[in-house]
Amino acid sequence: MVNKLEQNEDLERYVKGTRAQLWLDNYTRKKINILMDTGDFDSVSYLLKVSVHRLAIEYELGGVKVTETKMEAE
């Protein structure tokens, strides 16, 4: 089992904390608004979660192996 300290160290390689401040270009902002307007996403956080999961699948389909993080393996 991975201890809490190891989980935090792994997460903090790319994401600092559980909140993020993003700087978006206008094109990306418009796409987010269009996707949110569909009503399929409860929040922008959920939209980003779905987007990252789909991107990982696309990478793997393209031959790039996306390995599980320590937290996902639990």
Image (cartoon, rainbow, N blue to C red):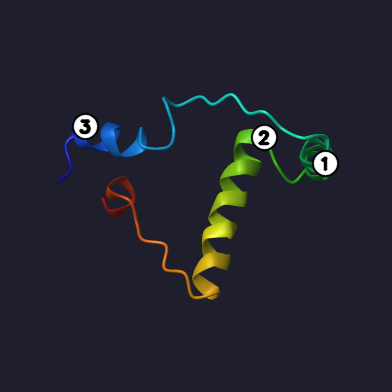
Residue beneath the point at 15% across and 46% down: 1
**Position of residue 39 measured from the top left corner of the image (x, y, whole percent):** 79, 42
Labels 1 and 2 touching (C-beta < 8 A) = no
Q: Could you tell whether 30 is left or right of 18 in the image? A: right
Mark 2 lies on a secondary structure that is helix
Of the pair 46 and 8, the residue shown nearer to us: 8
Of labels 3 and 1, earlier in sequence is 3
Q: Which secondary structure lies at badge 1?
A: helix
Mark 3 Cα-neighbour bin, 10 Å: few <14, some 14–19, many ≥20: few
Mark 1 or 2, nearer chain start: 1
Residue 6 in view here: yes
Estimate the spatial distance between the alpha carbons at disc 1 and disc 2, rounded to whole Å.
16 Å
Amino acid, disc 3: Lys
Q: Which mark is residue 44?
A: 2
Q: Which residue is under mark 1? A: 27
3 or 1: mark nearer the eye: 1
Which quadrant of the view contains residue 45? top right
The residue that mark 3 highlights is 4
Disc 2 crowd, CA 10 A, few/some/many (<14, 14-19, 20+): few
Residue 40 pos. (x, y %): 74, 46
Quadrant in the picture for residue 15? top left
* Residue 60 drawn above or below residue 9: below
Label tally:
3
Front one among 33 and 15: 15
Q: Which residue is drawn at 20% across and 30% down?
A: 5
Mark 1 is on which residue type? Tyr
Q: Where is residue 34 in the image (x, y as percent from the top left)?
A: 84, 42
Q: In which quarter of the image is residue 11?
A: top left
Contact between marks 3 and 1 (CB within 8 A): the answer is no
